Amino acid sequence: MPPPRNRLPMGRAVAGAFDRTSAFVCCALVVALLAVVSLGALTRSFGEPLIWTDELSRFLMVWLAVFGWVVASRKRIHVRIRFFQDRLPARAHQATELVIQFAMTLFGVLVAVYSVGLIGKNHDLDATSLPSRDVSSPTRCAS
């Protein structure tokens, strides 16, 4: 009898690439956020603040929160309080876990759907203090 074959090698490869890319983007965003905040603090200390560092740091923080949520969800490392859930019988524990994962997925879908509408309404607004590009929406960043 032949050994069992891995049924989803392509899916696992794609998921692994997605996870690595998401983690890389998170790292890049953390480095960029650190650099921008440091630059803002440094220029303020010399009495010549760069105004755009505040706005850019806000945008970077939002993008970091989005990608951080993706990474934490994929690794299942969100901060959770499982005091009551851990005291449930095995079947009830699994059922509550399923409900929690479904609720998180639903929340993510709702945020994505409403975000598309919000971007559609505000796509023509520019960042007020950034010198060159608007980084507030992914459609503007890609263009």
Image (tube, rainbow, N blue to C red):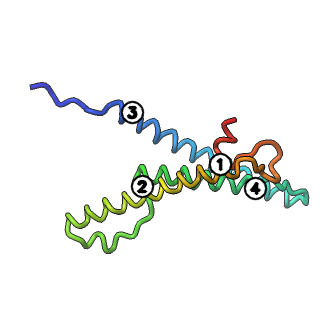
Front-most of residues 135 and 76: 135
> Alpha-carbon neighbours of circle 3 within 10 Å: few (<14), some, or many (≥20)?
few
The amino acid type found where label 2 is placed reads Thr
Q: Nearer the viewer, mark 3 or mark 1?
A: 1
Residue at image position (33%, 73%) is 83
> Alpha-carbon neighbours of circle 4 within 10 Å: few (<14), some, or many (≥20)?
some
The amino acid type found where label 1 is placed reads Gly
Q: CA distance from mark 2 to mark 4?
A: 30 Å
Q: CA distance from mark 3 to mark 1?
A: 34 Å
Q: Nearer the viewer, mark 2 or mark 1?
A: 1
Q: Nearer the viewer, mark 3 or mark 2?
A: 2
Which numbered disc, 2 or 1, marks the residue that appears first in the sequence?
2
29 with respect to 94 (left or right): right
Which numbered disc, 3 or 1, marks the residue that appears first in the sequence?
3
Q: Which residue is mark 1?
A: 120
Q: Could you tell me if the residues under marks 3 and 1 are in contact, i.e. CB atoms within 8 Å?
A: no
Q: Could you tell me if the residues under marks 4 and 3 are in contact, i.e. CB atoms within 8 Å?
A: no
Which numbered disc, 2 or 4, marks the residue that appears first in the sequence?
4
- x and y percentages locating residue 137 in the rendered image: 66, 47
The amino acid type found where label 3 is placed reads Ala
Q: CA distance from mark 3 to mark 2?
A: 22 Å
- x and y percentages locating residue 32 in the rendered image: 68, 47
108 with respect to 101 (left or right): right
Residue 55 is marked as 4
- x and y percentages locating residue 19 in the rendered image: 46, 42
Residue 13 is marked as 3
Residue 105 is marked as 2
Q: Please tell me whether mark 1 sits on a helix, a strand or a loop.
A: helix
Residue at image position (36%, 34%) is 11
Q: CA distance from mark 4 to mark 3?
A: 37 Å
Q: Please tell me whether mark 3 sits on a helix, a strand or a loop.
A: helix
